[in-house]
Amino acid sequence: QVRVVESGGGLVQPGGSLRLSCAASGSIFSMNAMGWYRQAPGKQRELVGITSGGSTNYADAGKGRFTISRDNAKNTVYLQMTSLKPAVTAVYYCYAVLRGTPTSPVMHYWGKGTLVTVSS
């Protein structure tokens, strides 16, 4: 079984910074990709960015003030957010694509999300 758990969300003032973490654990043979999505109140879930094979691709939602990094040894991905604005208030979800064993198919996993609120 695989668990994907986010941490680091909370309330931050406009202009502030926050770093989210996401750790995948359990039966993991290889990690193909890890990344972040977000869902703002009343809106659809959207991609922030994905890191895979040493490169990171950002969607429009993640360009500018967001940086994704990854610790392969720990199966952990981070989302560094700076100069935060109220418009980025959302639940941030971690996303992992992996194989549990050498012969298992590639599977997709989601965390339960962590709420980021930007407000004064």
Image: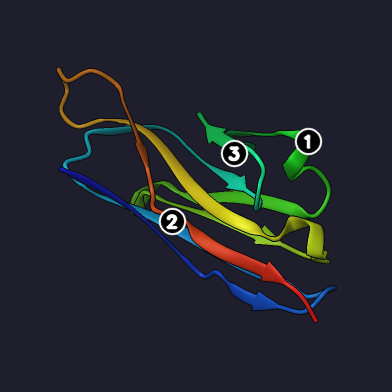
| Nearer to us: label 3 or label 1 | 3
Q: Residues within 10 Å of mark 3 (few under 14, many from 20)?
A: some
Local SS, label 3? loop
Q: Residue at x 64, y 56 (%)?
A: 90
Local SS, label 2? strand
For the residues labelled 2 and 3, say whether their Cβ atoms are less than 8 Å apart: no
Residue that numbered label 1 is attached to: 60
What's the amino acid at mark 3? Answer: Arg
Q: Which mark is residue 22?
A: 2
First of labels 2, 1 by sequence position: 2
Local SS, label 1? helix
Residue that numbered label 3 is attached to: 45
Q: How is the image coloured?
A: rainbow
Q: Residue at x 83, y 74 (%)?
A: 14
Q: State the separation of the CA atoms marked 2 and 3.
A: 18 Å
First of labels 3, 1 by sequence position: 3
Where's residue 13, x and y in %?
77, 79
Left-right relation of 117 to 6: right
Q: Which mark is residue 119?
A: none
Q: Residue at x 66, y 69 (%)?
A: 117
Q: Residues within 10 Å of mark 2 (few under 14, many from 20)?
A: many
For the residues labelled 2 and 1, say whether their Cβ atoms are less than 8 Å apart: no
What's the amino acid at mark 1? Answer: Asp
Where's residue 76, x and y in %?
42, 53
Q: State the separation of the CA atoms marked 2 and 1.
A: 21 Å
Image quadrant where one finds the N terminus:
top left
Q: Residues within 10 Å of mark 1 (few under 14, many from 20)?
A: few
Where's residue 78, x and y in %?
54, 56
First of labels 2, 3 by sequence position: 2
Left-right relation of 11 to 95: right
